[in-house]
Structures are given as C-alpha cells and as structure tokens.
Image: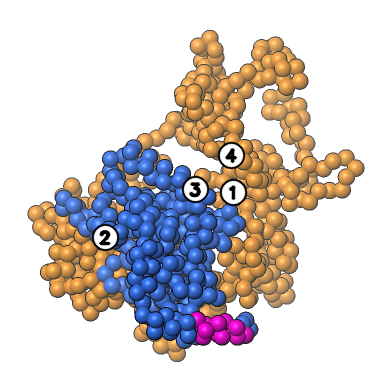
Amino acid sequence: MPKSVLVDLTRCIGCRGCQVACKSWNELSVVKTTITGSFENPPAMSETCYTRIRYQESEAGGKPVWNFVKEQCLHCKEPACASACPVGALVKTKSGAVAYDFDKCIGCRYCMVACPFEIPKYEWSKAQQPWVRKCTFCAERQADNLPPACVKTCPTGALLFGEADEVLAVAKKRLAADKKYTQSIYGEKEAGGTAWIYIADRPFAELGFNTKVPLEALPPLTWSSLSKIPMEIVGFVAVLGGLAWVRNRGPKGGE
Amino acid sequence: MVNVNLFDNETASFWRGPGVKPADVKTEVFFLPCATSVEKEGSISNSGRWAQWRYKAVEPPGQARPDAEIMNELALKVRELYAKEGGAFPDPVLKTTWNYGAKLDTHVVAREINGSWLADKEILDPKTKAVTSTWKKGQLVASFATLQADGTTSCGAWIYSGSYGDPARKEGEPAPDPKKGNKMARRGKEDPTGLGLYPNWSWSWPVNRRIVYNRASVDEYGKPWDAKRALVKWVEDIDPATKLQKTDPVSKKPLFKWSGDVIDGGYPPLKTPDGKVNPDGRLPFIMKKNGVANIFGNDSLSDGPFPEHYEPLECPIQENPLSKTHRINPTAKLFYTDAAKSSPEDVFESCSTRYPFVATTYRVTEHWQTGLMTRNTPWLMEAVPQNFLELSRELAAEKGIKSGDALKVSSPRGEILCKAIVTGRFKPFKVMGATVHQVGMPWCFGWHTPADGSGGDSTNLLTSTIGDANTMIPETKAFMVNVEKA
C-alpha cells in the first residue's frame, strides 16, 4: 500500500524541527545565510535543503497573520520527473516515494524542467559527479517501518504519516468537522494526485502554492512534449548517457 | 578563571574579545572541556519531579569528561596538597567524606544523595516503644521518614531519600549488583490510575509520590471529588489471602487504607463514615501553615502578597500611572548608586529622549539560552544565523529602515550591531496619550561564534541591571534603547 503524509498547516508552529531533522538524517551541508527580513532560512530549496518552512506574513482585520508552509517533494502518484527522465533514474516506488538512482542519472536535468513544483535541485556547486537531489520520502526509513525524519520530529502533529487512503480520509474528516479549514485538499487532484497532501485555513493560492498545476497526471503531457524533442538532443542525451556509464564504471570509494 | 564547558565561548575567551588587549588581562584562564548529557551517566529531574536515569550513549570526544569527574579529580588533588603542605584550616578539606573513587562512579554519588546508615539502629514506635524496624550500618536509607537526628544516618538531599534502594538478596545467592536498586532507572509502563502517573517509571521525589497534596482530590470521607479521575481513594483494606477486609487486632474495627498515588501524609479522611470529625485527620496541604492552599504567597516574601504594577527601571513615562510615589518597585535590588561608585554596566536612563524605544528580549526555537550549543550546530545557525531586531512598519518608515538593513542598537550600557526585521507583528502602542514604539531582540548571539563575527553581539550588553525583589531575576524583558541604521 502506498504511504502518504497529511500536512495540516493550521497545526504548524514554524519551529523548523522538520527542516533540521531532514538535514540531520540526510547529513546535508549548510549554506552561509544572513537575516534578510524574516525568519525564513535557508533562502530557497536547494541540493542541501530537501524541506524547509516558508514564513508568510500578512494582515487580516488589522491584525498580523503568520503562516508557515512546509515545502518538500510532493511525491506525485504519476511523477512528471520520472516520465521525463530518459534513463529511468527517477522511479515511483510502491511505498509512494519518488526515488532517485544516483548510478543511472546522467545529469540531463529534464526532471527539473518537468516538475510542476520545481522540486528537483542540481548540485551546481559540485565540480565532480553532480547529482540531482530532492526529498526521498525517507524511503530507507520506511523500509525499516519508520516514519520519515520530518514526521518523526514534528512536535505538534502537523505531519500525519500513514496509508494513503487512511491519511486522505483523516484530511476529509478534519475538513468536515471544522469550518476553519478551506474546503479543499491540495494534492488530492493536483498533477493527478500527490502522496503529500495539505489542508489549511486559507486559500492555497494565498499561501504561495502553485494552484495553476493541471488537475490531471502529467506524464502523458510530458511525453507529448518529449516526443517532439529533436533527434540531435536525443542523440546528445545518448552521448551523456555513455559518458555517465564511463564515469560510473570508474573506481568508487576511497576517493 | 576555570571554565568547564562544551565549547569555547565569549566568557572563556573574554581576554581576546573585541576591544580587549590580552597583554592587559591579568586573569589566567583554564578551559576544561566537559561531556554532554548523552556522553555521561546520571539522573535528570524534570519539572514533574521525576528523577530519570540516563545512560551514556557515546564516549565524550577528545579530552572531554563529565563535570563530576572533573570536580572529583580536582578535589582529590586539592586534598593531596593540603595533606602534604597543611594550610590555614585544612580540616574541612581533609576530613569531609569524599569517597567517590579515583575515577568517579555516578552510582556512588546517587547512593550518597539517597542516604545510608552510618551505624546499626533500631527504630522504636514513639508510643509503644516497640521496635518497628532494624537497620544495619551501610544499608541505604529507605525513605526520609527514617532519617535520624543523632548522626546515625547520612543523606545528600532528603527529598531524594528512597530514590536508590538495596536490591533484595536471596538466601544462599551472591549479592546482587547494587545498581539494580536504582529506582530512577525503572522503566515500568503500567498506569493503574489511568491518569498518566506511571508510578513504576523512574522515581518521583518525595517517596515516589506523583502528585503532592493528593488528599486535596478527595472529600472529607476520602471519596474522590471526580470519580472518573480518582487520584487517591479511601478503600477497604482487603487481605489478599482471605479476600476479607482486615480488622484492627485490638479494637476489631474494620480497616481502611489509601489506594492510588502514594498518599501525601498518611492521615485518614477528615471525617469518619458516621459524619463525625476524625481526630486523626489532617488537612491536605501539609507543608502549609493552615493546611490549605494559598492563592497569594505570604511566606517570607520581600514583595507581596498582593500583585502591584510598577514600571520597569527604564520606561517611556515619567510617572507610574498607578502609583505617584513609586515608579519602580521599592523593594527591587538596584545596583546603581551614583556615577562615581557604580560600574558602567549598571547605569540607567528612564524616560530619556536619547533612548526613546521600548526594547524586549526573547528566544528563538533554534537557539538555546546564550547559544553555546546551538551556535556550534551548523543546521541551526543556517536557520537563524545572526542577531536581529524586530520593529514595526511604522517605526521602520519613520527611521527609513528596511528589512535586512544593518542596525546599531544602543542603551545607556552599550551598543551592538544586528539586522532589521520589519514586521506587522510589532505595532506602536498608545501609552498615556503618546505613541510608543517597541522593538524585540533575541539574546543568543555573541562575538565568539561564529568565528567571522557575523552573528553580531549579545543583546545582554544592552539590558538593564536590576534584581526582582523576591527572586533577583534580572529585568531583561523591558528596557529602553535607540535604534539607528549602522
């Protein structure tokens, strides 16, 4: 059964335990940051930041409203990144994670273009063997029957991990039980449905979500554009693939 | 100066801080690296009074050692010197009991805190003079109730008496590992009352009582006020063998007992079942003079018992609107007397045009206290990298300040640099008809870490010096500053 996470934004207090737990579990490095006018840091999702909290300040009736939005890969049910990948480095696993195979990746970065949520990031800072990096849904933790690191650390229950159908049922139940919620579930239909779904007490467009995402699975669309790619580029991809094979064949470890 | 710490910090390195010439500093500084809580064994008491035993997860890095080991070794060395060279008054050093071993054993410390018998002793019933219990020298004290005033018992802290016991020894078997008697290490998950007391998890001071004054939860007959949440209950004392209620051997009256949490003061209910006052009954708040709860604290307070409003040492108004004669708390501890005698850290200027803005301080979730641990954690420094000042949009517009601008914040006691966060979460106040702006800052930064100085300085350089009348807690939540673009 695929797994899912419900992000209840009304329960998030912006503590960023998830952000730090993710970095800790995945042993991600840091970037040098400064205070630029909010608590938000690091400034963007990157190859060293798979999840972060976006701080959004606004006013309603003269009173300040502070919203916290967790960003990470949504793990689409039918991921456009996977269908765009010419070498099958990205695959949707049975557990719901969109997993990445370092050995297959040729660094073409089609996935980054295909993702409607702009999630996959490239290790531009690395001179050798740069890879595409993004949230892994803690697939290795899930394999050990553990929840993702961010879910495990969340102190307020803003993150609920479980069987996809049960998690969706909880989301629907919360919407029905409390009028404070905007009566929609982000990720239920977006891009054909995602493993990570959100509920909130404000319209998602106001919270910085991409609400222009088609409400259908993207891979057929991705494929229709991919099929129009000129043969020269496909050939170039083949060359890259060859290079990647040579690279990956080389000595590993002890470097 | 000896600094025992996890990391080097502003205190240990004061001699090379901003504006300090090391050659002028006469203090010799020793830095002794110590272990973190996960690198040593010991107990930790939470605010619910549970003393919970923690195990060592990993070895401390490098030369770092647990604080207790450092203290033990220092004490042994000091003793050695006193033994060799004598001194003005060596007895307290040489004759004090100090038997934790050359390499300190935390369990020995825990047992000393629990207390033990220094001599054989028989305890007699005060009325009948019959022997109620006998104790052997070296045995651990079972509870504070058996501590003696005649020098036959030793105890580090009476409230922890009973936290460590002697494990039961079976006939003909070798002595069990004494560590098995450590009740703080218990991990039973049973919760018979269903109230979350978990009486077999760790140990709660005193005597494993989970809720103090727990007889306040029952009426005068020992019946819980709330039957669904019975903390303690006066019940028939049933003999487990016969399944019959026990009776008093002399009076033959049926016996009752308290069930549930460890009863606070083992007195029977205030009334007997026939509605008469029980002469043995006692009101539940046994540590209070009148046996009842107090809404206002009235014991030995400098300030109290009733709450009163005073202005902070530094405030934006001339007069306390609620008291013409006392602007600030007259019983608060002031450190500033006059300019000639007081240090520059203690000066203050209230209602001054030079420092027109109310400042407050707070923490951020990412940093703990002064940031010693968290500023050395790159993931947390990435999230909150440097000192900042939050101010309202209105004040920002007035001063031409934008989010992210470098600011100079000054008070009569100092001046620091930080970054601006302009936010709607701060709003100007109307105080006595005038507009007053408030700004807020965390206080977890300092010049030493990060090493490039980008963290800014400690907000504590700005805060005022005054001690709360009852607790001496400093008034760091309200003081006056000026804010300028740096």
Between the C-alphas of marks 2 and 4, the distance is 52 Å
- Judging by the rendered image, the residue that carries numbered circle 2 is A212
Q: Is residue A95 visible?
A: yes
Amino acid identity at mark 3: Glu
- Judging by the rendered image, the residue that carries numbered circle 1 is B51
Q: Which chain's residue wears label 3? A: A
Range drawn in magenta: A240-251
User: In front: mark 3 or mark 1?
Assistant: 3
Amino acid identity at mark 2: Lys
Callout 3: 10 Å neighbours few (<14), some, many (20+)? some
Farthest residue in the top direction? B274
Q: Which chain's residue wears label 2? A: A
**Front residue of A210 and B79:** A210
- Judging by the rendered image, the residue that carries numbered circle 3 is A163
The residue sitting at 50% across, 70% down in the picture is A88
Dominant SS of magenta comes to helix
